Image: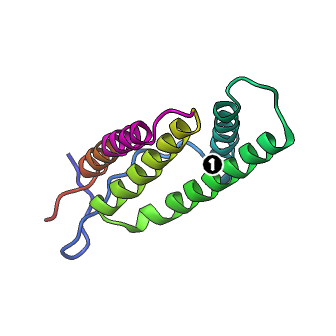
């Protein structure tokens, strides 16, 4: 089986066949964080109002929350290709753990439960991302 040539003393990441055009990838780079931000903002606003009516303050809270998550996710998407395995996994784990913990905190339950759920989610996502990155790198020559 053919192996990609290694850079001098380094590692390379194996790439799967690219079935989408460059235009599609550019569109997805901002569309996916935007959609995730809208869904997350709506979810956070719904958790905060506890099933009550939608108010202007609640709408603005959801809008700002969604924009913040969209910007953070876009930053992580542009940052992680330049990182090694551990910082790559830590970045995604921190984003996921913080997002889940914040959502749970909006329900009004205890802060300790929100922190625990956020830490557990972040650790799980971080381990999964580390495993994925580790298995998709070519070992050193």
Q: Quadrant of residue 87?
A: bottom left
Residue 84 falls within the magenta-colored stretch: no
The residue lying furthest to the bottom in this view is 8
Q: Which residue is nearer to you in this view: 134 or 71?
A: 71
Residue 28: % across, % down: 64, 48
Residue 120's image quarter? top left
Q: Residue at x 31, y 45 (%)?
A: 123
Which secondary structure class fits the magenta region best? helix
Q: Which residues are magenta?
A: 108-125
Residue 58 place in picture, x, y as percent: 77, 40
- Quadrant of residue 12 within the rendered picture: bottom left
Residue at 52% x, 57% y is: 77
Viewer-nearest residue: 120 or 137: 120
Query: SS at mark 1?
Result: helix
- Tell me, yes or no, if residue 22 can be seen here: no
Q: Is residue 125 above or below residue 137?
A: above
- List the single residue furthest toward the top: 51
Colour scheme of the rendered structure: rainbow
The residue that disc 1 covers is: 33
Q: Residue at x 43, y 62 (%)?
A: 80
126 vs 134, nearest the viewer: 126
- How far across and how far down the image is residue 135, in percent? 24, 46
Q: Where the N terminus falls, by quadrant?
A: top left
Task: Left or right? Give the position of 54 relative to 62.
Answer: right
Task: Give the side of residue 64 with respect to residue 83, left or right.
Answer: right
**Badge 1: few (under 14), some or many (20 or more) residues near its Cα, within 10 Å?**
many
Total count of labels? 1
């Amino acid at each position: 089986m053919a192996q990609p040539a290694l850079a001098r003393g380094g590692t390379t990441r194996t790439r799967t066949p690219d079935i989408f055009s460059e235009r599609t990838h550019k569109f997805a780079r901002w569309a996916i964080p935007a959609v995730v931000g809208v869904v997350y903002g709506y979810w956070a606003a719904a958790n905060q109002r506890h099933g009550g009516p939608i108010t202007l303050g609640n709408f603005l809270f959801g809008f700002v929350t969604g924009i913040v998550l969209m910007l953070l996710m876009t930053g992580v998407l542009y940052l992680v290709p330049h990182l090694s395995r551990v910082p790559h996994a830590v970045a995604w784990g921190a984003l996921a753990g913080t997002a889940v913990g914040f959502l749970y905190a909006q329900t009004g339950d205890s802060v300790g439960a929100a922190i625990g759920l956020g830490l557990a989610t972040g650790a799980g996502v971080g381990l999964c991302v580390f495993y994925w990155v580790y298995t998709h790198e070519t070992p050193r020559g």
